[in-house]
Structure formats: structure tokens, C-alpha cells
Amino acid sequence: MDYIFFLRSYGDFVVALYALKTKSNRQFNLIASSHLEPVYKAIQKAVNWAVPPVTFIDINIKKGLLSAFTNKFFFRFDAFKELQLLSKYINTIKQTDPEAIFWVEQRRRKKWLEMVTHNRFQSIHSNHRSNIYDS
């Protein structure tokens, strides 16, 4: 099974939900940081398209996105703690689904994420030169 993690900003999350509203032959489990849950609930009430189901996990994101994705918070202890909690959650998934494929929104700092969590990730957006929203 494929698992897409949403660990970035509100705007990225909303764009991704809209992109995923179309039917696909491929099944995805959508997993988002709990800091995105309020916007998800607001979208459910405000839009006239089927919002895909999302599982929310608490990995202690307090700065609006995973600290490892931004230069501003990259070297703070919180960045490592968030990654540890993410790694713990991923290991729980792997116990029941050893063939799981994990996805993140973009390639930026993907190697760092893989190194700390000891898991491979695919990236939805991999072209550094184009706008992530166009993808």
C-alpha cells in the first residue's frame, strides 16, 4: 500500500487534497500531521467535492511545517523530535504492511528524512526548477 505524508503547510495540503479528489486506480492512505486537521475540517464544510479521508497523527509540529523542511528551524531540537515521532509511526505501519511505500510532497531534504527515519521515501514533486503547485 502507498502512504502519502502531508507534513508541510496548509496551502500544500489543500492543493494536494484537491488534486487527489479525482478517482484513481491506485489506492493511497493519506496521513497528515495533526496541525493540518483544523483546515481539513473547514474544507469538509466549505467545498462541494468529496474530500478524501485522512488519518491525522501527532508528531508535534508547532511551526507550521516539519522543521526539517525549513532552514529557519532545521537545527533546532524540535526538528529531530518530530522526525523521531514520524519514524516511530512509520515503523508501526511497517509491522502490518512490510511492503509499504512512503511518499512526501517534495524531494527537498528527502535524503535527510530517510537518514533519520531509516526509511525510503518517494517524492510527489521532484523537479526543483518547477513550481510544486504545477505538479
Image (cartoon, rainbow, N blue to C red):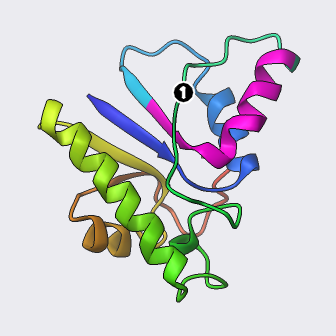
The image quarter containing residue 76 is bottom right
- Please state which of residues 134 and 41 is positioned toward the viewer in this rendering: 41
Q: Is residue 114 left or right of residue 62?
A: left
Mark 1 highlights which residue? 54
Residue at position x 52%, y 48% in the image:
58
Q: Is residue 112 magenta?
A: no
Above-or-below relation of 53 to 109: above
- Disc 1 is placed on an element classified as loop
Q: Residue 85: x percent and y percent? A: 39, 59
Residue type, label 1: Val
Above-or-below relation of 89 to 131: above
Above-or-below relation of 7 to 114: above
Q: Is residue 58 left or right of residue 89?
A: right
Residue at position x 45%, y 16% in the image:
24
Residue at position x 55%, y 83% in the image:
74
Q: Residue 80: x percent and y percent? A: 43, 76
Magenta range: 30-45
**Is any part of residue 9 visible from this angle?**
yes
Examine the residues drawn in magenta and state their main secondary structure: helix
The image quarter containing residue 101 is top left
**Is any part of residue 134 visible from this angle?**
no
Q: Is residue 75 left or right of residue 8?
A: left
Outermost right residue: 46
Residue at position x 72%, y 31% in the image:
40
- Please state which of residues 86 and 10 is positioned toward the viewer in this rendering: 86
